[in-house]
Amino acid sequence: MALPQTARVTALTGTPPLQAIGAGPAAGVEHDIIELREVQQLATRLLGIQFLEADDEAEETARLGRVRDYEQQLRAARFENFASRTDYSIKYANLDVIMDRGRSVCKIEWPGGNATGFLIGRKYLLTNNHVFDLMNAATKRNIPANKKTQNYRVTFFLSETQTNMSFTLVPRKPLSSDKALDYAILEIDIAKYGEDDLKHLRPLGEFVSEDLARGSVVILIGHPDGHDKKVEFCAVEGVDDSRTVCVNFGNSFAQAQTMTYHVSTFFHGSSGSPGFDKDGCLVLMHSRGFYPYQGAQSTIEQGVLLSSVKTHAKRSLPGDKFLEIFPEIQTGFTFN
C-alpha cells in the first residue's frame, strides 16, 4: 500500500480496532475509514467470512473468533500440503520476461510520501488515484519544498549495473482516472533522455490480460516502504467484476533456523505495484488492504483488474491516445 500511516476504526469497548493499510501521512482518517469499510465489504463477499465489525460486543467477539478459525484452517491446509495448495512455480523461460517488464516499475516520491507506479505508455505512468490525490494535496500546502517540481519524481531502477533513470512528475490533472477503480494515468517529462536511453524502459500497456481467476498466482513488483524494488508471489482468493482479493497468512509452523515462504512485505509504499501472471501478462494493480484483527499476522490485500482500467480508459481517452497507451496486439503468427 502507498502510505506509511494506518487508520484505525474505533471499535466497541474490549474489541481490538482494525487497521487499514492506508496511502500516506496526508490521508484523512475519515476517508481511510470509508476505504477500509469498502475493502472489508469486498472481502466479506468474495471470501464468505464476515470482516465488518458487529454492533454488539458479543457478536463482535464471536465474529473475531470465526476470522481466527478461518485463518487457522487456511494455515493448516497449507501445512498439510507442504505449505500451500497453490502452485507458485513459474516456467524458467518466463522469469526473464517478467524481470524484463519489471524494469518498467518505478518508485514515486513526493514531499512526505512515496508509492509505486509503472510505465504504461512511452511517457505515461499508471498508479493509484489516491497516490495522485496525495501528491496533489502536497502541492497545495504552503511549504516551500512542496512547490519545487524536482521534489515530485519517479525513478526506474533498471539493474545493478545500469544507471537509474529519474523523471520529474508534476501532479497535474491525470489523462484518465477513476476513484472507484483507484487508478490515474499521469504524464512524465522524458525530454532529458534520448531514444537510446528510453529503449531500456518498455511500456506495459500492450501486455494487459483479462485472464485472472480465483486460484491464480500473481507476481507483484514494487517498492514497499520506498525501499529497493522487490518481487512477491501472491495467490488470488477472490475476483469480482473489477477487483481482486488476496489473503496472505503468516506461517504459524515456522521454527527457529527454518526458512519459510509467504507474502509478507507488500504493504506501505506498494500502492500502484503491477501484478503479472505467470506468463508475464499484466493482470492487476495493487491498491490497499487491512489486518482482519489487531495483532494478526495476516493481511487481506486488494487490487484492481487492469482489464477494468483499460475499459474505463477507453471510454475517457481520445481514440488515438488510447491506442498509444494500450496498443492492439495482432494475434496469430506468420513465417513471412
Image (spheres, grey):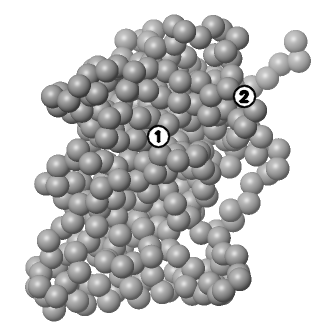
| Amino acid type, label 2 | Gln
Q: As drawn, is 306 to the left or to the right of 65?
A: right
Residue at the image point whose x is 26% and y is 22% from the top: 147
Residue drawn 45% across the image and 76% down it: 297
Disc 2, SS? loop
* Outermost residue, front side: 144
Camera-nearest residue between 13 and 212:
13
Secondary structure type for disc 1: strand
* Residue 308 position in % (x across, y down): 41, 38
Q: Residue at image x 72%, y 37%?
A: 160
Q: Quadrant of residue 159?
A: top right
Residue identifier under label 2: 162
Where does the image place residue 279, in percent across and percent down from the top left? Answer: 70, 44
- Spatial separation of the CA atoms under disc 2 and disc 1: 20 Å
Instruction: Residue 305 in the image: state x and y as whole percent.
Output: 45, 44
Question: How many marks are shown on the rendered structure?
Answer: 2
